[in-house]
Image (spheres, grey):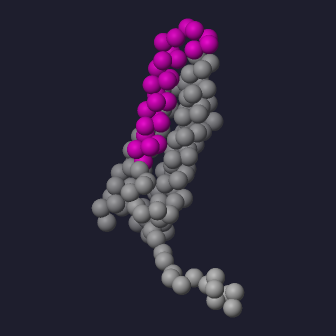
């Protein structure tokens, strides 16, 4: 009796966790843009306290970039996407590493921030192609 009471009455499936429209690579891009801006501000400042605060914020923003990319990678993109765009796993791996300790989280090199932005743009291009389908 209890099994019948708690048994699902309707089986549903969805492409993603919520109705599509909640995912957007722009979230990662906004954080990556702020990282690039922070790097420029640090380069222009001699104030050690300001530089310390800026580096902490840059590291936090780098973690947010990784978070937003991981959500896209693991929640939005599904097997058919990876079949159609076999480079997606590599793009996400490279992008998250560019936001990690060996990337923007661990350096003040603006070129690394530019590389991160370029990877996010590549992911965004594929993302928007999948939204058209």
Question: Outermost residue, top direction?
Answer: 46
**Magenta region, residue range:** 25-50
Residue 36 point in image, percent of width and height: 46, 28
Seen at 41% across and 50% down, the residue is 24
Residue 95 point in image, percent of width and height: 51, 44
Residue 96 point in image, percent of width and height: 55, 45
Per the picture, the main secondary structure of the magenta-coloured stretch is helix
Residue 103 point in image, percent of width and height: 57, 35
The mark total stands at 0
Question: Outermost residue, bottom direction?
Answer: 1
Residue 106 showing in the rendered view: yes
Q: Quadrant of the N terminus?
A: bottom right
Seen at 56% across and 46% down, the residue is 67
Q: Residue 37 appears in which quarter of the rendering?
A: top left
Q: Quadrant of the C terminus?
A: bottom left
Seen from the viewer's position, the closer of residues 88 and 41 is 41
Question: Outermost residue, left direction?
Answer: 132
Question: Is-magenta flag for residue 124?
Answer: no
Seen from the viewer's position, the closer of residues 101 and 69 is 69
Locate residue 129 relative to residue 40 in the image: left or right. Answer: left
Seen at 56% across and 36% down, the residue is 62
Locate residue 93 relative to residue 5 in the image: left or right. Answer: left
Residue 90 showing in the rendered view: no
Seen from the viewer's position, the closer of residues 7 and 43 is 7
Q: Residue 83 appears in which quarter of the rendering?
A: bottom left
Locate residue 100 relative to residue 79 in the image: left or right. Answer: right
Question: Is-magenta flag for residue 33?
Answer: yes
């Amino acid at each position: 009796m209890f099994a019948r009471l708690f048994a699902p009455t309707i089986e549903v499936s969805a492409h993603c966790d919520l109705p599509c429209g909640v995912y957007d690579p722009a979230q990662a891009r906004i954080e990556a843009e702020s990282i690039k801006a922070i790097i420029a501000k640090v380069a222009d400042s001699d104030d050690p306290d300001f530089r310390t605060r800026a580096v902490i914020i840059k590291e936090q923003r780098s973690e947010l970039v990784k978070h937003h990319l991981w959500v896209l990678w693991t929640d939005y993109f599904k097997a058919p996407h990876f079949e159609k765009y076999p480079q997606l796993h590599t793009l996400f791996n490279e992008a998250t590493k560019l936001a990690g300790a060996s990337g923007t989280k661990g350096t003040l090199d603006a070129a690394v921030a530019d590389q991160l932005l370029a990877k996010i743009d590549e992911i965004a291009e594929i993302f928007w192609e999948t939204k058209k389908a």
